[in-house]
Image (tube, rainbow, N blue to C red):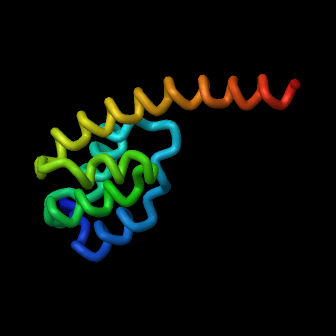
Amino acid sequence: TATYTRSESKSLQLLLDNPPIGDQRPSQLLNEMRYLAGSEVPTSLLCKLWINRLPQSCRSILAASTESDPSKLATIADKIMETVDTVVPAHTSVQHQISEL
């Protein structure tokens, strides 16, 4: 049987065409990108592509981290996103209350 393997350029193209994070957790996005990358894409490049898909608020916080392991960064990013998700509705509620005045 023939075995299908993706070339490095095809893996890179799949990663570059990958949609933004949407409603996924950062760790889910990283896992999806790891799957698309296979073993052809260096971890450092994969990590940079992944971070660039995250919201700006999350990227800013991760930039201050000394952590370099993508799995650990994904755990941190998940926690950041959980915090942002709980803060944003409260902010939106205040804006709504102000607009009703």
Q: Nearer the viewer, residue 45 or 51?
A: 51
Residue 46 position by quadrant:
bottom left
| Residue 58, percent from left and from top | 38, 46
> What's the residue at 34%, 38% (across, down)?
28
Q: Quadrant of the N terminus?
A: bottom left
- Judge from the rendering whether residue 2 lies leftward or rightward of residue 54; answer left or right: left
Q: Is residue 17 above or below residue 35?
A: below
| Residue 33, percent from left and from top | 31, 52
For this orientation, the residue located farthest to the bottom is 9
- Judge from the rendering whether residue 46 lies leftward or rightward of residue 101; answer left or right: left
Q: Nearer the viewer, residue 23 or 87?
A: 87
Residue 27 position by quadrant:
top left
Q: Nearer the viewer, residue 63 or 8?
A: 63
Q: Is residue 24 above or below residue 37?
A: above
| Residue 52, percent from left and from top | 37, 60
- Judge from the rendering whether residue 67 lies leftward or rightward of residue 35; answer left or right: left
Q: Is residue 9 above or below residue 54?
A: below
| Residue 80, percent from left and from top | 35, 35
Q: Quadrant of the C terminus?
A: top right
> What's the residue at 39%, 67% (across, down)?
16
Tally the marks.
Answer: 0
Q: Is residue 78 above or below residue 22?
A: above
Q: Nearer the viewer, residue 33 or 20?
A: 20
> What's the residue at 62%, 29% (across, down)?
91
